[in-house]
Amino acid sequence: MAKEITSREENYSQWYNDLVKKTGLADHSAVRGCMVIKPYGFAIWENMKAQLDKMFKETGHVNAYFPLFIPKSFLSKEAEHVEGFAKECAVVTHHRLMNNPDGPGVVVDPSAKLQEELIVRPTSETIIWNTYRDWIHSYRDLPLLINQWANVVRWEMRTRPFLRTTEFLWQEGHTAHATSSEALQESQLIHELYARFAEDYMAMPVIKGSKTESERFAGAVETYTIEALMQDGKALQAGTSHFLGQNFAKAFDVKYASENNTEEYVWASSWGVSTRLVGGLIMTHSDDEGLVLPPKLAPIQVVIVPIPKPDEEIAKVANKLMDELKSKGISVKFDDDDTKRVGYKFAEHEMKGIPIRVGIGKRDLANNQVELARRDTKEKALTPLAGLTDHIVGLLDEIQDNLLKRAKDFRSSRTTVVDDFETFKKTLEEVPGFIEAHWDGTAETEAKIREETKASIRCIPNDQKKEAGKCVYSGKESVGRVLFAKAY
Amino acid sequence: MAKEITSREENYSQWYNDLVKKTGLADHSAVRGCMVIKPYGFAIWENMKAQLDKMFKETGHVNAYFPLFIPKSFLSKEAEHVEGFAKECAVVTHHRLMNNPDGPGVVVDPSAKLQEELIVRPTSETIIWNTYRDWIHSYRDLPLLINQWANVVRWEMRTRPFLRTTEFLWQEGHTAHATSSEALQESQLIHELYARFAEDYMAMPVIKGSKTESERFAGAVETYTIEALMQDGKALQAGTSHFLGQNFAKAFDVKYASENNTEEYVWASSWGVSTRLVGGLIMTHSDDEGLVLPPKLAPIQVVIVPIPKPDEEIAKVANKLMDELKSKGISVKFDDDDTKRVGYKFAEHEMKGIPIRVGIGKRDLANNQVELARRDTKEKALTPLAGLTDHIVGLLDEIQDNLLKRAKDFRSSRTTVVDDFETFKKTLEEVPGFIEAHWDGTAETEAKIREETKASIRCIPNDQKKEAGKCVYSGKESVGRVLFAKAY
């Protein structure tokens, strides 16, 4: 199986597509740009979802559900929003089909034209703020801390599974606050939460920072982002959190009576991560043999393989181990399918990225030991049966930590401090990755650098050092370095 | 608050709408026929979802996700399916908006017309079976036991929150099997599972049975249903499970190589329950004071109220109780908001349907006791602090059981055995509910009864007694009674 995957060196993009397909994560569909998320891929997303949902709830958020459709006129209400989102989208114009009067099949019933077209939500700020107008009257109604798990549609011209698809799954938080500082704090709280999730669960290190004005969400005053670095040196915007000021409150006339009985516009934040994270997970850890999954998100954390075939004694040891692991909340599979050879199973489990494989053979059992293989380093070790469960629990933590460390080391090796434009261009070729360089703060320079190099400003890092310097492109004054990279 | 709810006797339909609105379950939206599911309503749906998802997984199913859009031509491929689903639906015809050249706002870009229109899924058999063709080659690929949690759209003319909305949330299972009997068994397994969920979690008794041919799902060979009886005597179809035979496999050319190397069409089942269940839950248990929720699905199971105000001693007792209840997996809220009066809080918690209220007052505390009030019977009892947690755990079970019993008793009192058509019509007026009557088995009679009485055949019950009789309408021979009712 594994040999059907193109190597990363040969063609990274093809490697990614092969991996997604061969490991059963996703499949193309009959609808242009839409993917089918297969059970194994969906199980990873479910694990992400469960953890994020827990973190949202722990920080006081609740879930709700708003309509899939947005009246066309809503999109035009916020001036910048319409520019960003009202262009490539799915437009519902009719509500009925009828039998084709001229032949087989069905056709659109021309008499069932909608008075106002409906847009399949590309994001839900407009419909949600239109609803909040009815929910918010007084300061006592605030804050509203609402999240929604939903599908959204953006009509993309070039799509790639998980990374950019016409329809994708995501969560979108939409919060309403009495003061500017509360809304700003909320957007920062979620920014931190996203970074923590990426590092602690995905083992994917991220740079936290703010977007430049030209990269901001359409309608936002400030956009915070977490930026990860993929193995091919391209950056991935993995999650954004927006401080929206009063823009949507003004567009949808959402006011509240303050404690002093004045009438004020409400302050807002919105934030989201999507199935794109699954793409990020793949491109952070996986290798030419297949997926490498961090234990905290792996659908199957441990697989047990009888060598060469299952028998009563092996089954007894395996069942005991399974019970013990399950009681510790570890998901485990006993692969006792005896129609497949051991070598085939090993390759398959490797490809699926299962963090630990336990091989149970007759000879090793006689010595009261089994063989543990870890997916991240491919190391194998004979391990005593005594204390095996605790050992596995510890090893899962070790693998999780090692994946994060490895990804951090990789990022360090691909982050270059650059001070002139020639070196900037050379670095993009020779050490693809993040470049820390001075920038004069103008959209003009940002656009020109992008035009000439395809690298964009990923963010102005939160921990940017204030240092005087010269813009790498214009030579003008700068007060700190920003992060450049080519990006997905 | 509670007095703003219309009484059930006065107007059941208005009572339902009031309840949904005032208890914060759902709200109307700006999009015709689409509702907003508010946090409290969504929390009930989340609890349902979590339990159903667990039951699906325990029976070997996995989740996946298929596209929201279905190419128009797919709907026509299965002859009956197109009649049932290709009519009132949302049709996407364009993929771009542009600035209005003649004024403000945006308009549909006529140059962005889709070659083939896309339908927002009303159900996903067609797109899924089109995908299964690529996934199924040999008997080794079977069975496929896949479920999807998704939103679907059916352009309904008359909508009511939860019960019938243009967009709704549901799960749809789509399974593929090598043999007819396996697919049939799967549809029956899920039928049982739905009934168990309804009774054990929703405390909503249901009649299990088969639909008549004219009420079958479009494209099914057999449709199993669970039918519940609402307080106003109308039936609610609460979940259906379909045996699809080879209809979709033939329509989408899905074949597999059998063990004997013959080529065979694949056998199928599909099944679903939706946010409609929330409506059923409301209309099974609630009363003029508000919601009554079964403990197993209540977002908040126990509320603790300090009487009249929180103080240090009360807070200490409350916190200890909360910790103990939480450690037993019980969700509990301490309502220590001292801007609201105790009476107001009581009415609010009653309206929200919280199963148990614990009132902690100074004087009772001096006697080492608190006041427990149960929502179902409205009984109050002074209860000793010693063993309080265990008592509450037991009481939650008792409430759950009592709700089911009460609903069963109600259903018995509203189920009438009828043998002639005059009594049939009179019974519908005087004892609205289920009617068990003989039917001659023809679609013609079924349609006429419906026309003259608005009552339909809800199902041919699984436990139908084989007895000779005369059809209540035509007087022709019958071999058993079927279940009639007016229905939502």
Image (cartoon, coloured by chain):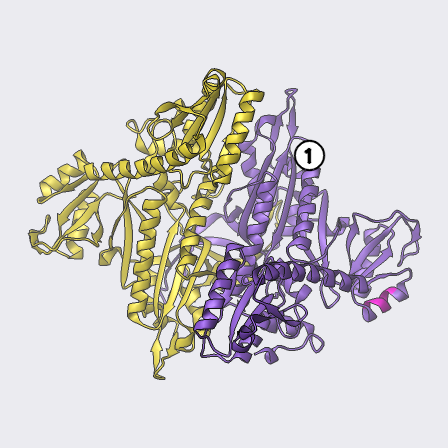
Chain colours: A yellow, B purple
Seen in the picture, residue B152 relative to B392 is either above or below; the reply is: above
For mark 1, name the chain: B
Name which quarter of the figure residue A406 lies in.
Answer: top left
Q: Residue furthest bottom?
A: A261
Residue B195 inside the magenta-drawn segment:
no
Q: Going by the image, does A241 lie left or right of B32?
A: left
Q: Residue at x 42, y 46 (%)?
A: A48
Q: Residue at x 66, y 46 (%)?
A: B193
Foreground residue among A287 and A18: A287
Foreground residue among A315 and A415: A315
Foreground residue among B214 and B397: B397
Instruction: Tell me if I can see residue A219 in this picture.
Output: no
Seen in the picture, residue B204 relative to B128 is either above or below; the reply is: below
Residue that numbered label 1 is attached to: B182
Q: Quadrant of the C terminus of chain B?
A: bottom right
| Percent x, y of residue B36 | 51, 64
| Percent x, y of residue B427 | 84, 67
Seen in the picture, residue B387 relative to A336 is either above or below; the reply is: below
The range drawn in magenta is: B424-428
Query: What amino acid does circle 1 point to?
Result: Glu
Q: Residue at x 42, y 47 (%)?
A: A166
Instruction: Tell me if I can see residue B302 in this picture.
Output: yes
